[in-house]
Image (spheres, grey):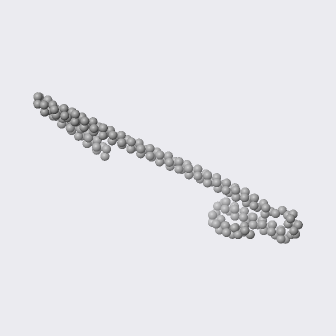
Amino acid sequence: MVLAALLAIASPQIKADRKTTARLLLILVGIQILLFVIDALRVFSGSVDDYKDAFHITQLAFPLMQVVLMGALIIRFINTLAEAEALNRDLASKVEATRLDIEMNFNRKREIELQQAAEMERSRIYRELHDDLGSKLLSIAHGGRDSRLGDLAAATLQSLRESVSRAIFSGSMRLE
């Protein structure tokens, strides 16, 4: 009776589910109820001695149901394990793609930082050259002994200023 009530309650859910395991369990519960009805008819239609000596087929249904349920659980476990492995492989490929992307971005950023450092060092060297050579050339230009040498020093100083300005300006334009 209890099995019949469970079957009536679970039947709509099992039919809506439409999975093989659910159908198999529904069939097993139906067989259990059928075997119970057969045993009950044999008990009520025969004598007490026939009942005591009779083989009750309902006893076979419970172990059969347990074996089928265990098989269904094992199949579900195997399928879930395969799905988890597939998801794990998918996750591993996404992690690898992300790692490669991060590595590429890191290398790109490192390259830009190296370029910026090189440009800053060039600018520093140009400024030092300008300051050092500029002061010496200015001293020569204003020393006044030889006007030709002073003119050459002034022209060289102007050329140095233009070179440093171009180098600093072009370096800052490349960085932006």
- Residue 11 lies, in percent from the top left, at 67, 67
Vertical position of residue 138 compared to residue 75: above or below: above
Relative to 131, 104 lies left or right = right
The residue most toward the bottom is 45
Seen from the viewer's position, the closer of residues 8 and 15 is 8
Residue under the point 20% across and 38% down: 161
User: Horizontal and vertical percent for residue 84?
Assistant: 58, 52
Q: Which corner quadrant of the image does residue 136 belong to?
A: top left
Quadrant of the rendered structure where residue 140 is?
top left
Q: Would residue 50 be found to the left or right of residue 10 on screen?
A: right
134, 160: nearer the viewer: 134
Can residue 156 be seen here? The reply is: no
Q: In which quarter of the image is the N terminus?
A: bottom right
Q: Please report the residue visible at 85 percent of the width from the left and 66 percent of the height from the top.
A: 51
Which percent across, then down, holds residue 175?
Answer: 31, 44
Q: Can residue 102 be seen in this view?
A: yes
Please provide percent x and percent y for residue 116.
33, 41
Tally the numbered discs: 0
Residue visible at 29% across and 37% down?
122
Instruction: Decide if residue 116 is on the left or right side of residue 164.
Output: right
Q: Residue at x 38, y 44 (%)?
A: 109
Going by the image, does 13 lie left or right of 157? right
Q: In which quarter of the image is residue 28?
A: bottom right
